[in-house]
Image (cartoon, coloured by chain):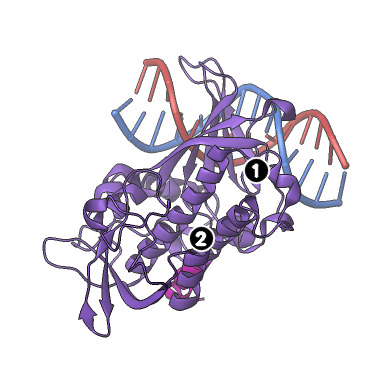
Chain colours: A purple, B blue, C red
Amino acid sequence: MSLLNCEQKNLISELIHGLNAAKQLQAQIGADPSWRPSYSSCLTTEMKETLLHQIVSSYEKAILMANGSTRTTTQHNPTTETVATADPLSGKVPESPTSIAGSPGSEDFLDGGSKDYILSSKKRKMLPKWTEQVRICPERGLEGPHDDVFSWRKYGQKDILGAKYPRSYYRCTFRNTQCCCATKQVQRSDGDPTIFEVTYRGTHTCAQRNQPPEKRESKPIATVVNSQNDLLDNLRTNLTVRTTTNGIEGDGFSFPVTPPFYSYESINGDFGNGGGTFCHHVGSSGPSDFTGLISTNTSTGSSPLFDVDFHFDPTAEIDTTFHTFLHDTI
DNA sequence: ACGATTTGACCGCA
DNA sequence: TGCGGTCAAATCGT
């Protein structure tokens, strides 16, 4: 498989990941009671907000991947933090998560043994990194936040200086078989033992995320109370969606920087300054169709990443909107 | 037998 | 040189 095709595959996977989160949210709002009924009993408002965040994260990662796949150079940034703040189109662009993680077929994974470790040691620093604070449900016990939908394999544990609890290291179960180099670190909070800080590195390139959640090994016992993704936050800030109707350019909008990302508001197309909502309420008379160009703000102008035919229904729920995006862009 | 976990050792970086 | 991250052999569980 070529690198490009692999990145396209990952892009689709990312979008599907978001779709699955949207479906879970759909179940929570009662639109689809058949979706994981056992899961709903443990969900709180915070968890629903988390699902919303997963949707926007997948959406943003997909955009970032699409941006990365359009470039032919393999410029590396020295640190993850630099990646998070780089201008996606200025030439100082970060590797897309897919490229950073190393696609199957890239030189990272053609090497084995100690050489792979030596190489990955440097490249690991360039992996996208974000941290979530996960609170375990007391009724499920204190065995740890093994709640996310991916299958992880523990490969180490360390006592951390100044920390009351040891830090556990996990990698994707399919690291070897599917060249998925996603890792996570889990450490229990000193202050509140019911809270685990989970630091993720790299995005999953394995097939896990393509599977419906009920088919994965999943123990939904935790509630994410806060999450941060520096890379995607910056991308969100720099994103603007330009809209046109019948070739006439309309008001653009940006993605909100602070939650609620998806709360629906009737703001009649005012999405300026990043303070609007994702759902574009074109008017009060009903559903409207228009074409959206997703681009990034740069000093040298914007380059469209997608030509997207949106169909926004002002009465629709967010998952419908995201679903529409998936169907219209792939 | 095979996969997952544990744990001491090793390595790179600040 | 100490700390964090990872390796890999030993051990455990199914």
A165 or A225: nearer the viewer? A225
Same-subunit check for callouts 1 and 2: yes
Q: Position of residue A245 (x, y in %)?
A: 28, 80
Q: Which residue is mark 2?
A: A317
- Of helix, strand and loop, which one carries label 1? strand
- Amino acid tagged 1: Arg
Residue A217 x/y as whole percent: 72, 50
Range covered by the magenta-colored residues: A1-12
Q: Earlier in the sequence, mark 1 or mark 2?
A: 1
Where disc 2 sits, the SS reads loop
In x, y percent, where is residue A198? Answer: 52, 35
Residue at numbered disc 1: A153
| Vertical order, A255 against A9 (above or below) | above
Q: Nearer the viewer, mark 1 or mark 2?
A: 2
Q: Is residue A104 visible?
A: no
Residue A5: say if magenta: yes
Q: Main secondary structure of the magenta part?
A: helix
Residue A310: quarter of image: bottom left
Q: Chain of mark 2?
A: A
Which residue is rendered at x = 43% and y = 60% of the image? A59
Give residue A6's position: percent from left, percent from top.
49, 71
Q: Residue at x 54, y 27 (%)?
A: A187
- Tell me if residue A225 comes above or below residue A78 in the rendering: above
In the image, residue A133 lies in the stretch drawn in magenta:
no
